[in-house]
Amino acid sequence: MFEPNMLLSVAAVFFLAAFVKGVTGLGFSTTALPFLVLTIGLKETLPLLIIPSILSNLLVMRSAGYFRVSCSQFWPLYIATLPGIVVGLILLNSFDSHTCAAVLGGVLVIYSAMALRNPTFRLTNAKVRWLQTPVGCVTGVLNGMTGSQVVPVVPYLLSLPIERDHFVQASNISFTLSSLVMSLGLTQLGLMTLETNAISSFGIILVFAGVQLGTRFRRWLSPSMFRRTVLIVLICLGSSLVFRLMI
């Protein structure tokens, strides 16, 4: 299924996404998804990102702390994500790949636009608790259908008065749990094969190299400027995924 030129494209995107993560902290999957979807398709992309995503998340979680606190505070959100992913995978298997890719494009445009604006809104205490279940469920549906794990869980967590490391831990628990469930679902759908697992495992090397180089490069480049540039690129790529459905 994967020709040499296609493998080179996958390897280049893995390294680029890891480099962006090292410089800006932007999620690996968030950056890699639109490039690979435009190259090889959504259903072929999703299984390739599982293993690198899980390992990069675990590395971040180990150094962030707040694991027990996050599990205790956000367990309704995490649990609600699980049935949402199942629904999303059913939609992925039912709808045309271009339709799911267009949904992914819309999600990326919304997420990147919100990140560019850097909103400072805060949820009231009364809304924080009861929003966890719908936020988790919608995040799961979008994750299962498109592979994107950031909306609406990241904007939700950003609206809470929690420490930066607490936010990192809480969001990465959600990402990791989603990725584990996605791996099971994609296996059931026949999308995770020995070939995709081998390519995904090889990508670990590129991920580590890209993150290390990006972390060093951060010293010479303004992270805020680079982050804005990446988000603008994601908006353009997300828009192209939407427009492809209209052509």
Image: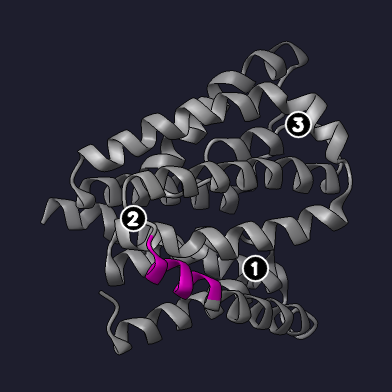
Q: What element carries label 1?
A: helix
Q: What residue type is labelled 3?
A: Leu
Does residue 198 show up magenta in the picture? yes
Q: Where is residue 235 in the image (x, y as percent from the top left)?
A: 42, 58
Q: Which of marks 2 and 3 is in front?
A: 2
Question: Mark 2 near mark 3, Cβ–Cβ under 8 Å?
Answer: no
Task: Tell me which label, 2 or 3, sits earlier in the chain.
Answer: 3
Quadrant holding the C terminus? bottom left
Q: Quadrant of residue 62?
A: bottom right
Q: Name the residue under label 3.
A: 160
Q: Mark 1 points at which residue?
A: 21
Task: Characterize the local packing of mark 2: few (<14), some (14-19) or many (20 or more) Cα atoms within 10 angstroms.
Answer: some
Task: Tell me which label, 1 or 2, sits earlier in the chain.
Answer: 1
Is residue 140 placed above or below 10 in the rendered structure?
above
Q: Give the range drawn in magenta.
A: 193-201
Q: Nearer the viewer, residue 168 or 194?
A: 194
- Residue for point 86% across, 42% down: 163
